Structure formats: C-alpha cells, structure tokens
Image (cartoon, rainbow, N blue to C red):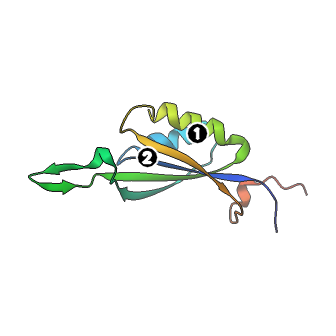
Amino acid sequence: MDLNIPFDLIVTIVNKGGSETIITATKSAGAEGGTIIPGRGTGIREQKKLWGIPIEPEKDIVLTIVPQEKTQTVLDAILVQGSLNKPGAGIAFVVDLKKVVGICHMCQLDT
C-alpha cells in the first residue's frame, strides 16, 4: 500500500549522552521518537591526543523520521535545545525520503 505521504529523515550527531536532549526536543516539536546509534567522531574538533595516542570521542547519532510538514519545526527545536549553534555541540541535517514503510501509526488513513 503506497500512501504517498512525504517524510524526511533528520540526522543529528551529538556528543555521547546528548541524545536524550535531542529526543526530548524532537518529541516536544511533534516527532514521535527516534533511534539512537553509537558512533565515533573524526572531525577537526575530535583530533585530540592523550599521551600521544589519538582519542576518538564517542558520539550519539539520532535518526528521526518526520512528516515533511513538521521538519522545520523539529529541526528548529533540535538547534535550540541541543545548542547546535555552539562550536563542537553537534550537527543536524535533513535527508528527503523517497519511500517509507513500517510506520503506519504515523499515517492518517481515510477509511
């Protein structure tokens, strides 16, 4: 069944432990939840060493699927509550999803 409802994926990468703030922000802005994946950073701010050994700081990657009509509101909440306007706080970006299945609870069916 193809419902033709446009969705976006918001990917947010923050320091380990910051995912709860992001999830809270997205839910308050109308998202229904998210998926948290552990990761490691290799950006310019992560190039630190301890006794000459490179440190790869741990990151949280939060994946949030939202209807496109809610994307900007959710992204704004992530920016503000996650303090992403501060250097080294994290990054968020949006990917347009062509097809999504398995989230029928997010779709309003006219029956």
The image shows residue 36 at horizontal and vertical percentages of 46, 55
Q: Are marks 2 and 1 in contact (CB under 8 Å)?
A: no
Task: Name the residue type under label 2.
Answer: Ser
* Identity of the residue drawn at 77% across and 54% down: 107
Q: Does residue 53 appear to the left or right of 29 in the view shown?
A: left
Q: Does residue 105 appear to the left or right of 16 in the view shown?
A: right
Graded by Cα atoms within 10 Å as few (under 14), some (14 to 19) or many (20 or more), the crowding at tag 2 reads many
Q: Secondary structure at mark 1?
A: helix
Q: Does residue 42 appear to the left or right of 23 in the view shown?
A: left
Which quadrant is the N terminus positioned in? Answer: bottom right
* Identity of the residue drawn at 37% across and 34% down: 87
Q: CA distance from mark 2 to mark 1?
A: 14 Å
Q: Is residue 101 above or below residue 69?
A: below
Task: Name the residue type under label 1.
Answer: Leu
**Picture disc at residue 19:** 2
The image shows residue 92 at horizontal and vertical percentages of 51, 44
* Identity of the residue drawn at 82% across and 60% down: 3
User: In this view of the protein, which residue sits in the foreground, 41 or 61?
Assistant: 41
Q: Is residue 45 above or below residue 101?
A: above
Q: Which quadrant would residue 29 be assigned to in this image?
A: top right
**Picture disc at residue 34:** none
Q: Is residue 52 above or below residue 82?
A: below
Which quadrant is the C terminus positioned in? Answer: bottom right
Q: Secondary structure at mark 2?
A: helix
What residue did someone put label 1 on?
Answer: 75
Residue that extends furthest to the front in the rendered view of this protein: 44
Residue that extends furthest to the right in the rendered view of this protein: 111
Q: Nearer the viewer, mark 2 or mark 1?
A: 1
Number of numbered labels in the structure image: 2
The image shows residue 85 at horizontal and vertical percentages of 45, 31
* Identity of the residue drawn at 71% across and 46% down: 68
Q: Which quadrant would residue 37 be assigned to in this image?
A: bottom left
